[in-house]
């Protein structure tokens, strides 16, 4: 079956912090930030050494390495498409997590880079833990200096469609990457797996984007109609707004990506987070009769999702209480009340 052509993610050039905040972020759509990190020294090495880019970048990266072991994922050799996923019987996953020295990992990575026989990858490791001097010459201020980078280093592989509960800027340093993205509202067409038994923390689509089984997953055709694709080279970055699903393919023999998460539980800058509400709703709302769920939906729409600008006009300002913007003390009071509710021994 001939693959359909997907719509391209919009490309932006000459992006600085002001343009990002004023023009790109408000759209709440993915954006290619072309050449955003072209001035990074590691990117310069990747571009200058066409025939030995991997060795040049790894050499420079190793010079920044301060020691210590790394955790990495090793994909089973029998796994199709190099996709990190569940095993065939869904009793576990098709990869293992191992620990080795950085040098040992690099040696294995480079040995597999020409044979493509084994996918290995360091995934979402804090840059500061291994390369504390990285930010001296590789800075990015679109989210602010308090947001710290993480790195992904491996060979050919695919991460199944998943979401982050934070805004994400992902920068390609070495190799090429393809992102296939789906809007949050496509969740009903993506055949999402379990919430609490996942390959890497976030639930994933059960559909193989590279080879979708439309007989088994017919609604995925509708998701593809809304999908966007972005192909990035060294120096390029992509902005992925919160809750946008993204399938990520590392296309080169050796790939290095550095990303920044802002907000949500991933970055640890917000507590509590919306996912807490979803989990609470699974506990309190999911098993109610349909008519009661519909009634509560109206309340959620009124107070949260569809609250009009004049919703509080009929309430005197001094008695709006927690319906107004919450103060720090009010947030603390609500948190303590919820804790007491959840810890009540009378609750089943």
Image (tube, rainbow, N blue to C red):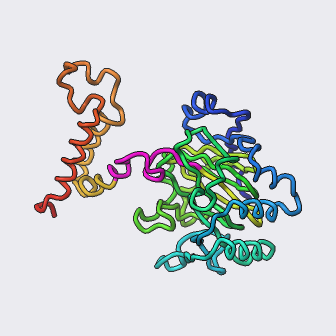
Q: Is residue 70 visible?
A: yes
User: Magenta includes 141?
Assistant: no
Q: Quadrant of residue 247?
A: bottom right
Residue at the spot x=70%, y=47% of the render?
137
Q: Nearer the viewer, residue 85 or 201?
A: 201
Q: Nearer the viewer, residue 209 or 2?
A: 209
- With 7 as the anchor, is 214 left or right in this view? left
Residue at the spot x=73%, y=78% of the render?
117
* Relative to 324, residue 250 above or below: below
Residue projecting furthest to the right: 51
- Residue range in magenta is 260-278
Q: Quadrant of residue 87?
A: bottom right
- With 32 as the anchor, is 196 left or right in this view? left
- With 214 as the anchor, is 287 left or right in this view? left
Q: Nearer the viewer, residue 136 or 193?
A: 136
Image location of residue 309, percent across then percent down? 35, 23
Residue at the spot x=76%, y=44% of the render?
38
Residue at the spot x=72%, y=64% of the render?
62
* Relative to 288, residue 240 above or below: above
Image location of residue 84, percent across then percent down? 59, 69
Question: How many callouts does the rendering have?
Answer: 0
Q: Nearer the viewer, residue 141 or 311?
A: 141
Q: Is residue 1 visible?
A: no
């Amino acid at each position: 079956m001939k693959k359909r052509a997907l719509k391209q993610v919009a490309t932006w050039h000459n992006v600085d912090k002001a343009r990002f905040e004023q023009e790109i972020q408000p759209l709440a759509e993915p954006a290619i930030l072309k050449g955003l990190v072209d001035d990074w020294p590691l990117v310069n090495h990747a571009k200058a050494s066409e025939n030995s880019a991997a060795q040049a970048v790894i050499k420079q990266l190793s010079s920044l390495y301060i020691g210590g072991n790394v955790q990495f994922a090793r994909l089973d050799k029998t796994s199709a498409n190099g996709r990190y996923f569940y095993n065939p019987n869904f009793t576990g996953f098709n990869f293992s997590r191992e620990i080795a020295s950085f040098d040992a990992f690099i040696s294995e990575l480079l040995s597999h880079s020409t044979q493509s026989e084994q996918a290995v990858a360091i995934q979402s490791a804090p840059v500061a833990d291994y390369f504390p001097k990285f930010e001296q010459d590789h800075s990015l201020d679109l989210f602010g200096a308090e947001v710290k980078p993480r790195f992904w280093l491996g060979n050919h592989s695919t991460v199944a469609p998943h979401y982050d509960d934070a805004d994400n800027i992902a920068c390609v340093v070495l190799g090429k990457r393809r992102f296939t993205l789906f809007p949050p509202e496509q969740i009903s067409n993506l055949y999402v797996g379990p919430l609490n038994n996942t390959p890497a923390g976030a639930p994933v689509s059960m559909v193989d984007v590279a080879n979708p089984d439309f007989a088994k997953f017919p609604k995925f055709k509708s998701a593809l109609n809304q999908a966007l694709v972005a192909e990035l080279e060294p120096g390029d970055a992509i902005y992925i707004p919160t809750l946008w699903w993204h399938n990520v393919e590392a296309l080169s023999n050796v790939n290095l990506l550095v990303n920044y998460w802002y907000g949500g539980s991933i970055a640890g800058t917000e507590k509590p987070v919306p996912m807490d509400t979803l989990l609470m709703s699974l506990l309190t709302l999911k098993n109610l009769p349909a008519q009661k769920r519909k009634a509560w939906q109206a309340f959620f729409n009124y107070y949260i999702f569809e609250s009009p600008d004049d919703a509080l006009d009929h309430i005197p300002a001094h008695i709006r209480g927690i319906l107004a913007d919450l103060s720090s003390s009010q947030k603390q009071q609500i948190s303590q009340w919820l804790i007491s509710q959840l810890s009540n021994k009378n609750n089943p």
